[in-house]
Amino acid sequence: MGNEKDLRLALDIATATGGAIIAAVMPALAIPVATVTVGANAAGHSFIDRHLARSRAAVQETIEAAVVTAGITAEQLIAKIAADERLLLVFSDVVDSSIRSALHEKIRAMGRSLGKMAVDEALIDPESVWIGIYKVIERPHVRVLQILFSERAKAFQSVYPDLYDAERLGSLTGLGVAVQPILSTLTDIGALELYSAQRSTSAMPEHYREGKLARVLLSNLEGLSHTT
């Protein structure tokens, strides 16, 4: 990737661009001075320092993935972003999402999309769609998708080997009933499909199966893939 000086400069610019995002959480951390002890105040500063360090690391991870994909320096990447309003809006969105996520594969995937957009204008729209998908994905969503390709999960299936109801997916992932909003999100983005059918005289409960984007999504999240 680009040299260290380029990366430091890009990080400074990126941090400034995302400054409003980071600063937005600071009022919630503000505590009236008269109501805190010196020790509590120091702890608050330590928390803020860790938060800012984590935010900067997320931005760095995003930029590194982008420059490797684009084949340009970090400084050139930031210059391209600054010169295009569409890229600048996407970049701000990506920085916001990266700062708020602990899923590093997602952060890098958004960075790769950003890198593609920076060097090919024709990819701005399709990669923007992918970034929108990555934004709603976190570890629980990945866990559900991986279950679809897990031999352990398939062992539980009998008559309908490719279908999973919400209760079973909740059990296999350890999410319980909390799996339901995860399933809704995955269905909305095309990674899961709903399947309903009439079986004899009673209706078969709603089941889920692999959607058209499931394998592509896991492939795009480098390091997270389905079981082959």
Image: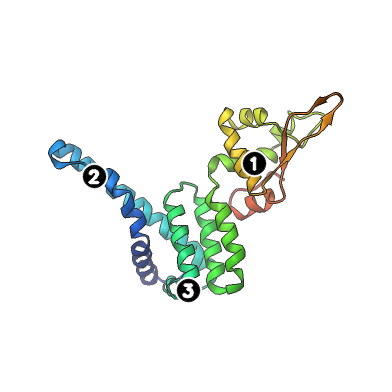
Note whether 37 is above or below 85 in the view shown.
above
Q: Earlier in the sequence, mark 1 or mark 3?
A: 3
Q: Secondary structure at mark 2?
A: loop
Q: Give the quadrant of residue 176.
A: top right
Circle number at residue 84? 3
Circle number at residue 50? none
Crowding at mark 1 (Cα within 10 Å: few <14, some 14-19, many 20+):
many
Q: Earlier in the sequence, mark 1 or mark 2?
A: 2
Q: Secondary structure at mark 1?
A: helix
- Please name the residue that numbered disc 1 is placed on: 146
Tell me the amino acid under the disc marked 2: Ala
Residues under labels 3 and 2: Cα distance?
35 Å
Q: Nearer the viewer, mark 1 or mark 3?
A: 3
Crowding at mark 2 (Cα within 10 Å: few <14, some 14-19, many 20+):
few
Tell me the amino acid under the disc marked 3: Asp
- Colour scheme in the image? rainbow
- Please name the residue that numbered disc 2 is placed on: 30
Note whether 13 is above or below 173 in the view shown.
below
Residue 72 x/y as whole percent: 49, 74
Tell me the amino acid under the disc marked 1: Gln
| Left or right: residue 196 compared with residue 35 | right
The foreground one among 128 and 74 is: 128
Q: Give the quadrant of residue 159.
A: top right
Residue displayed at 71% across by 46% down? 211
Crowding at mark 3 (Cα within 10 Å: few <14, some 14-19, many 20+):
few
Residues under labels 1 and 2: Cα distance?
41 Å
| Left or right: residue 184 compared with residue 60 | right
